[in-house]
Amino acid sequence: MIAFGLRLAVAGGREALTRLVVIAAAVAVGSGLLLTTLAGVNAVNAQLTRYAAVYPNASTAGSADPLWWSTRDDYFHGQQIVRIDVAGTGPDAPTPAGVPSTPGPGEFYASPALRELLAAHPADQLADRYPGRDLGTVGPAGLPSPDTLLAIVGGTPDAVRALPHARQVSNVGDTPALPEATVDLILGVIAGGLLFPVLIFIGTATRLSAARREQRFAAMRLVGATPRQIATVAAVEAAAAAVAGTAVGFGLFYAFRSPLAASRSPVCRSSPPTCRWVCWTSCSWRSACRPARRWRRGSRCAGSGSHRWASPAGSPPPPRARTG
Amino acid sequence: MSVVIEARDVTFAFGQTPALRGASVAVEAGEILAIMGPSGSGKSTLLHCLAGILVPDSGEISFAGARLDTLAETQRSSLRRDRFGFVFQFGQLVPELTAVENVALPLLLSGVRRTSALERAKAWFARLGLDGLEERRSGELSGGQAQRVALARGLVAEPQLLFADEPTGALDSLTGEQVMDLLVSAAREQGTTVILVTHEARIAAYADREVMVRDGRVNAPDRIVS
Ligand SMILES: Nc1ncnc2c1ncn2[C@@H]1O[C@H](COP(=O)(O)OP(=O)(O)OP(=O)(O)O)[C@@H](O)[C@H]1O
Ligand SMILES: [Mg+2]
């Protein structure tokens, strides 16, 4: 029956194929949209989290020793360089994101882009701004983007306290940048504004084909297909559309994602498996399985004595005026 | 001869509309029975009750000596698949399938392998003058061709009983007679019992016996009005 259902779905003539393609396309748009949205929200969230790692909020809560922190902007040939001055006040002070340990006075870390810039210019033009011992490279967790020019420079607490925007920080980068409620709100707006029309489109596409399905299933019941056989055929058909649609949706998503990723924003590349799973279940399958449920409802009505199932839908009513 | 299927005092209503009010009829093995009567008299309803498509509100249907109306839907489905064949007025072919697949459908549903099902189905095309139409879909067939494909499907599983509801109702009279000729000769050849609903006397004339349905009851055969 499974092979038979597939046969009906993909090799049932031009009309059946059109139907499959329309439903699959709707599912594709829906799942592609949802994937892109989730990845986008996730990307923005991750991006903001990394900004939070560069511009942490002042906080003195907790028993940890605070870290003195100052973020300043510096410019070289018109390019912005982020300079973070830090000074630990004790052994429990937090460590800035992206580096293994807080630099002490006379030590610094540089981002990969800054490192290139340093190498490309004479020391008296740029490197002299960061005197002392180079401890290494700032990792991605501390960078809003891979090409961010950034230095984390160690100092004494007294020196850093005197810098502009100096603040005491007791934790760095572990507070989510977007509150959950905000993420929900964004998703809700996207769902309402974008997915709802798509769902209506899917609904219309499936309803258009419902009459035709009804006719086919009536014809099959007539020749003795059991309710289970018909349910199998309906489910296989729905699944074919869902699988095809989801595959295309993933294709769309990856096509969309590549240019985003190419914009060198590292976080656009993230879309955790949970997101994909949510897409799979909530969007494509639900909407594509609807015709099967519609049919089940239809069959229950038919079972209660309607004549419709004996004379397949689509046939005009028998002439009533004539007499034998 | 023995009675193969029988309705005893069957009533059936569509909601508030009574369609059968105590209909009784018995059909003998190998017989071709015509059920006649005015439009709306309950002919189709009686046929559907006999075939186990509709379940009577009261009364009994027995097939081959056993109650049919008390069977579960699944059992009636398999009975329809294995023992009964159907030819209706129109709309009975699955539009997504080719003609030969439509004919093979009852065999496929009862688990016959695809290749042998199609083999058996193809044999009917020559027999019913349908050569070369095997791969057409129902939309690409004329009314008479579609009706012959439906007839082939009704007979392909070599049913004991063939239910025909106005099988020529959508055809012109010449095409209708060709289909009836084929139906009757194939049924006689296979020994299939035929229950034929029609309101045309010319079609009823192909039958061995005629009964008349009026107001949901089956009247004596000698009171036929044409
Ligand atoms: N699906 C249905 N819902 C409600 N009433 C129905 C339905 N089908 C038939 N009826 C009614 O039941 C009665 C018997 O109908 P049936 O179809 O058995 O008549 P028929 O003798 O086959 O008529 P025809 O020659 O026009 O086909 C009629 O009054 C008809 O209106
Ligand atoms: Mg009728």
Image (cartoon, coloured by chain):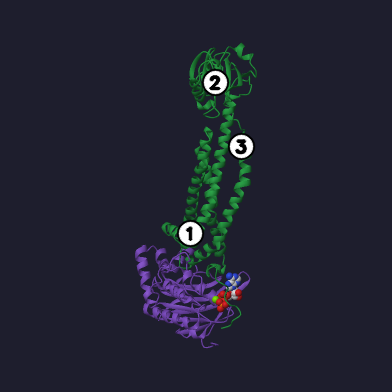
Chain colours: A green, B purple
N-term-proximal mark, 3 vs 1: 1
Residue A264 placement, left or right of B4 = right
Res B57 quadrant in image? bottom right
Which residue position holds label 2?
A151
Q: Amino acid at mark 3?
A: Val
Residue at point 48% right, 75% down? B143
- Label 2 CA crowd tier, 10 Å (few <14, some 14–19, many 20+): many
Label 2: chain?
A
N-term-proximal mark, 2 vs 1: 1
Q: CA distance from mark 3 to mark 2?
A: 31 Å
Q: Is the residue A287 above or below the residue B55 in the image?
A: above
Contact (Cβ within 8 Å) of mark 3 with mark 2: no
Res A86 quadrant in image? top right
- Label 1 CA crowd tier, 10 Å (few <14, some 14–19, many 20+): some
Return the x and y of residue A15 as percentages of the image width and height.
Answer: 50, 62
Q: Amino acid at mark 2?
A: Ala
Return the x and y of residue B11 as percentages of the image width and height.
Answer: 56, 74
Which residue position holds label 3?
A183
Circle on res. A17: 1
Residue at point 50% right, 69% down? B53
